[in-house]
Each structure stands twice: as structure tokens, then as C-alpha cells.
Image (tube, rainbow, N blue to C red):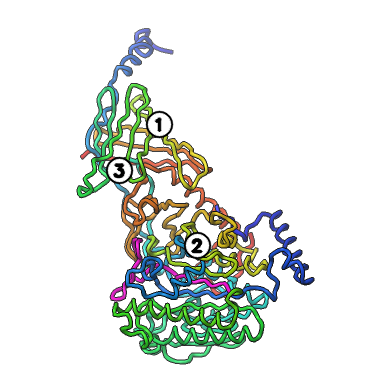
Amino acid sequence: MNRPLGSLPVWRSQRVFAIVATACLGSWLGVLGVASGQATPASRPNIVLMFPDNLGWGEVNVYGGVRGAITPRLDRLAAEGLRLNNFNVEFSCTVSRAALMTGRYAIRTGATQTAGITLWEVTIAEALQSIGYATGLFGKWHLGGDHPEHRNPSQQGFAEYYGIPRTSNEAQTTIAQGQTATKTSFIWEGQAGAPPRNLKPFDLETRRTLDREAAERGIAFMERSVGDKKPFFLYYPMTQIHFPTLTHPDFVGKTGAGDIADAMAEVDYNVGLMLDAIDRLGVSRTTIVFWCADNGAEGRRPWRGSSGPWSGFYNSVMEGGIRTPCLVRWPGRIPAGRVTNELVHEIDLFPTIAAAVGADIVPHDRAIDGVNQLPFFEGKQARSSRESVLLYANAQLRAVKWHDWKLHYVYAPEAGGPPVAPLMRLFNLLSDPKEETDIKDANPWVQSVTDRILNEFNATTQRFPHVPPRTPDPYLPPKM
Amino acid sequence: MLRSPLVALWLTAVLPTTLAAQPPADFSGRWTLEAPAIALTPAVPGTPAAAAASGDLGSGWGSTITIVQDSKRLRVEYAIFSQYDLQPPLTFTYPLDGSVGRNTVMLGRGEQVESARARWDGQTLIIVTTSQIADRGVAKPFTADSTRKLWLESPTTLVVEVTRAGVLGGPASTTRSVYRKT
């Protein structure tokens, strides 16, 4: 069972408090942080989190890409760091971003596309901002629902932001989610203490240039932060390769392999811009770089992506919907060139980042499902800190992964499609990566294990009830 | 108070003998699972996404099974692979003389062997199956037990109830499957 950090027993909370108090004192003395291996405020690493959209496993060369060798920068990033082969995410865009930002399974947050998440949620950005980080978002938000101006990134810890409030398909209709009129979709920007400002229409023309502009603004943000001698958290939620998969003019026809391949070449190029900037600024060894996707492959034609060896697409909990590429680089701390099939989930990034910056910034007043993976990433721990993954489709539990096993409680292989009988199916993802041969008859014992995991999760909801979907702000949890 | 010594004699001596002499239930035949309908409800109110009640593990024998039974054994057979796979159906044989039977299945994870012992409880056949489990996710091998009860609710209705013991700190579970003779 993964240990939820936010629901530590009292003795453990006290011990954590004692450790934190000691570390703070040590930091103040300017000694202990170094002696204990903990980061001091001045030496805290920068965090760069790049998060492309609807990018399937089969799009990246180092993951066995199907469209040719079009991702050299990502391949090099993999060689310089850790490649996760069993990185798990939520099945769809908004819920994935909710989980990533909060360290909580999205079902706990009540996240929906139309409403986003409440301002009560504490994001990685808020946590890092609280210890002096410069924070910036450049790209796609999609956590503010139909009225993102009231749930905008600056209210969730991003001191500045630029990009789109919602999602990329609005470029085709120019109708903002929740609206009916055309030309209501905009690219926006904003900063803390000020309302968002619509900059220009979001349409098929501006869709093409958005990721490049976001990268350039992100680089300017890093330059300012380094100049200010402030550690920074740069969140670059790229809009490629979500449909409409139309690239920057520089990449139209670049690969000769179609729109998705062109878009991947653009993703690779923009990643390269970021990495080059990190090098140029001299902060490579003090910057942790994460590159991972929000959910599985785009499934909508004509821009259907590749799930690589997995079955299914996003909006399903088949492996093709919830297992994505993930690369992590921290020179000098995370060994280069390592590849692992151990379970990791996007919710682990928050506690892992907290550990990396050496600060107790993960909330304690709510259930946190993420676990600290830093010792595993650094090679100090052989196995992942995680044994299982819960897979929800909105409010419904669909499946549980435990080590190499995956038990579907409700088997619904097609994105948006109905469940298919028999509903409960068991697969071993090593012997049957495509989830084709149901072997529950020969291995029924697995259900006992996954039931236990579910029971333990459900027990936490007694103390920490889920935030109901579409809860207005201000939200306060019920007193238990 | 019994009215007649003859009735008392019949109840104490003849009836048990008659019951004991009753032949055991015969489960032979081809049976098809009466699958519960998948009730769809919105996963999130107001959205079109459909949700369904969770499934269950069923009988552990598939949805269409063929049973061949004689006085010495009960054999259950069902297909799991397609014709293209060129694989025989899975076959499980259970001795009915109280001895332990062993069954082996090959589902791409080596030869998985289970041992089973069957006994009658009236007209109900009880089969206790034990499997040795060695899994990458667990430090030490362990055993997993399940108990199947088979009975006929009618000549054309077979009930298979399976209780799987909990393992690794997890709970036990019981499912009941109803098959119709086809």
C-alpha cells in the first residue's frame, strides 16, 4: 500500500514536525541543510515540468516510436536521466492536471472539465511559492472550468501565466467551453493580483504558434528568475499533440510523415529550446527536468495517435489511455541512462518535488495519494515507493493495478464506449501487455489484494471526504 | 409424541436409508451463464459518460461450460481461446471418491497447477481448490484457496457459488453464478 502523506498517524506527524522544525533551524544556521543533505533555500533546485497533451507512448523514438527518429532531443534527455516505462496518469485531460497539481487522485478533488477544481486545493505551484519559488505557467491550464477567470492559475500559485484557459479543440470552433458563440475563445495571460487578460483569439492560426510562444515566454521567465537568484518552478503544459494537430509553420511537412509526426518534431524542438536555455543559464545541475504526458494517445481522427504496444486511447483506462512516457533528469543526483518498469504515478511528483527541495510543503490537512519517489529516482532504493494505482473514469472506479497485475472491475475498452461483459477482467501486463486474455479464472486471488487496496482507499474518504464535483468556492471540508 | 410406532420406525430407519440411497445430483450437460444485465447510470450526473456496476469473478469456469459426470469424477470443460488460437479447451477433472485431483492450465504464465478435493453434502457438491502462488510482487510463495458449491435449483438451473479466501491481508469474496441448460 502506498503511504498517503496527508494522513500520517499522530506519532508520525509529530516526528515529521520535529524533523521539519530541526531542518528549519538548521537552515537558519546555514549548516544543517548541507550536513543532512537537505536543500537550503539558497540551494533549492529549480523545477521544470513539461507536460505535452494527448501524447501516446508510440510517438517518442526512445519509447519505440513508430514515425521514425524524429525526437532526438527527447532521446538525449532519456539518456541523460531516468526513463519510466510504467508511468501512470489519469485517463483524461482535466482530471490528469488536477492529479498532477495536487498529488491527489482526481476523484478526491471533484475535478470536472466544466468546473475545474476548487481554490481550496493546494497545487505544487502554491507549495513552492510558499517557500520563495518564482512560479510560472506557460501553456494550457484547463483547471478553471467554464469560468476560468474565477479559477485562474494565479489563484493556484502561479505568479504569472500565458496560454489557453481550457483546451486546444476550441481552436477549431473558436467557441469557448461553456459558450455558444464563435470567437469566444482566447489566448490569455495574467499575473498574481490582477485579473486575466485576453490577448488574442484562439483559432487555427494562433493554435499553430502557441507552444513556441509559450516556450519563449518560459525561457524569459527562467532568465529573470536566475537573474533574481530565485529558484523557479516552470510549468510548460504544451498543447501539442492534442487535436487539431496543426504545427508551427516551421514544422509543416517537416518530417514527411504526417501532422502528428510534424507535431512531435515540434514538441522535440521546443523541449530542446528549454533544455538549451537551462544549459545557457548554467543551471543544469540545479534543475530537475520532468517531461511526461497528461494521458494516453489522442484517439480522434484524423489525428489519431499511437499508443505503442498498449491497447486503447485516452478517455479509457486501458494502458494506452493511462500509461505515458516520462523522463526525469537531475544531473548528479539521478543516475543517467536508467530505465525502469516500476510503478510511478503523476500524483507522486508533488511529494517527490517536496522531498527534492527539502521542504515540508505537502498539505497535511487532506488525503495525499502521491508518494515520495526521490530515493527510487536517485537509485538509493531498488523498488518504487508505489505498489498500486487506482484508475477512475470520472466518478467510477474502473480498474486497479497492483505490480504487474491489472484487474478491471468495469471493462470498457473503448474511449467513451459502453462497458463490455464480462465486466471484471484480469490481465498480467507483462505476459499480456495488450490486455487481451482474461486470466481471472486461473488467478482469482488477485481480487483479494485489489479489494484490500480499494478498501484502504475508501477508508480514507471517511476522514477526508471527496470534494463534490462542481463545488463552488469557497470550499471548506466538512468537519469530521 | 409420535402417533404410531410404525411412523417412528419409518422416520428413524427407512427415511435416512432412502435419502442415502438417492443418487447424487447429476450436473452433466451444457450450461450457459445467465449474465446479469449491465445497468448503466451516468458516471457523473449531467454527463453522457456511462457507468456500470462492478463485475465479479463469476464461477471461475467461463460463461459456457460442458460438464460430464459419472460416479467417479466430474469433468468441467470450457473454451477460453478462439478457433484461430488452435488451443484445446480448458479441462478440470475432480475425483468424486474423496481423493485429491490435480488440474493444470496454460494461459501464457507457465503451467499453473491447482489441487482439488470434492465431497458431497446432500445434493450439493463441494470442491475445495488450492493453488500455490509465486508472484513477483510478493516476497514468499503462498497458497490461495477457493470453495465451490454446485447444486441444481431445477433440472435446467445450475448454481455455482464460489468463496475465495482472502490472501495477503485482503478480504474473502463470494460470487454466485446461475447457469441455464442449453
Mark 2 and mark 3: Cα distance apart in space: 42 Å
- Give the position of the C terminus of chain B as an image quadrant: top left
How many numbered circles does the render carry?
Answer: 3
Q: Main secondary structure of the magenta part?
A: loop
Kindly identify the amino acid type of the residue bearing the numbered disc 3.
Gly
Q: Quadrant of residue A21?
A: bottom right
Kindly identify the amino acid type of the residue bearing the numbered disc 1.
Val
> Dot 1 lies on which element?
strand
Q: Is residue A219 left or right of residue B28?
A: right
- Give the position of the N terminus of chain B as an image quadrant: top left
For the record, the magenta segment spans A287-312
Q: Residue at x 30, y 17 (%)?
A: B21
Q: Which residue is mark 3?
A: B62
> Badge 1: few (under 14), some or many (20 or more) residues near its Cα, within 10 Å?
some
Residue B6 in view here: yes
Looking at the image, is mark 1 or mark 3 earlier in the sequence? 3
> Dot 3 lies on which element?
loop
Mark 1 belongs to chain: B
Q: Is residue B124 left or right of residue A162?
A: left
Q: Which residue is mark 1?
A: B128
Q: Residue at x 58, y 81 (%)?
A: A154
Kindly identify the amino acid type of the residue bearing the numbered disc 2.
Arg
Q: Which mark is residue B34?
A: none
In the image, residue A228 above or below residue A351:
below
Q: Residue at x 50, y 45 (%)?
A: B138
Q: Which residue is mark 2?
A: A338
Mark 2 and mark 1: Cα distance apart in space: 46 Å
Q: Is residue A295 magenta-colored?
A: yes
- Which of the two marks, 2 or 3, is nearer to us in this view? 2
Mark 3 belongs to chain: B
Asked whether the beta carbons under mark 2 and mark 3 sit within 8 Å of each other, the answer is: no
